[in-house]
Image (cartoon, rainbow, N blue to C red):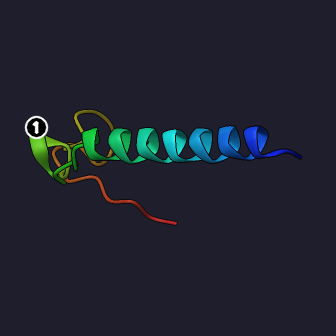
Amino acid sequence: MNKFELKNLKSLASKSEKRKSFFRSLIKPVQAGANGTLDYVVKEGSGKNKIASKKQ
C-alpha cells in the first residue's frame, strides 16, 4: 500500500464518519403518548371501552 492509497482510505473513513454523525443529528426523538398512542381503547369485543394493555 502506498501513501496515496493510505491517504484516500483515511479521507473516505473521515467522510463516512461525518456523514453518519450528520444523519444521527437529524433523527428526532419520539414522545411516548403523542397523538394518543399510549392508551388505546378497545372499541369492540368483550373488553369494550377498556384500555388495552400488553400482556405476555
Classify 35 as above or below 39. above
Q: Residue at x 69, y 43 (%)?
A: 9
Where residue 25 appears, as percent x and y from the top left, is 27, 46
Count up the numbered dots. Answer: 1
Residue 22 occupies quadrant: top left
Q: Residue at x 28, y 48 (%)?
A: 47
The residue furthest top is 44
The residue furthest bottom is 56
Residue type, numbered disc 1: Asn
Q: Judge left or right: residue 34 versus residue 10.
A: left
Q: Which residue is drawn at 45% across and 43% down?
A: 20
Q: Nearer the viewer, residue 35 or 7?
A: 7
Q: Judge left or right: residue 39 versus residue 1.
A: left
Mark 1: secondary structure: helix
Q: Which residue is drawn at 15% across and 45% down?
A: 49
Q: Which of 40 and 36 is in front in this view?
A: 36
Where residue 52 appears, as percent x and y from the top left, is 28, 52
The residue furthest front is 3
Q: Judge left or right: residue 34 versus residue 13.
A: left
The residue where tag 1 is placed is 35
Q: Judge left or right: residue 20 versus residue 10.
A: left
Residue 4 occupies quadrant: top right
Packing grade of label 1 (10 A; few <14, some 14-19, many >=20) is few
Where residue 35 appears, as percent x and y from the top left, is 10, 37
Q: Which of 8 and 46 is in front in this view?
A: 8
Residue 2 occupies quadrant: top right
The residue furthest left is 35
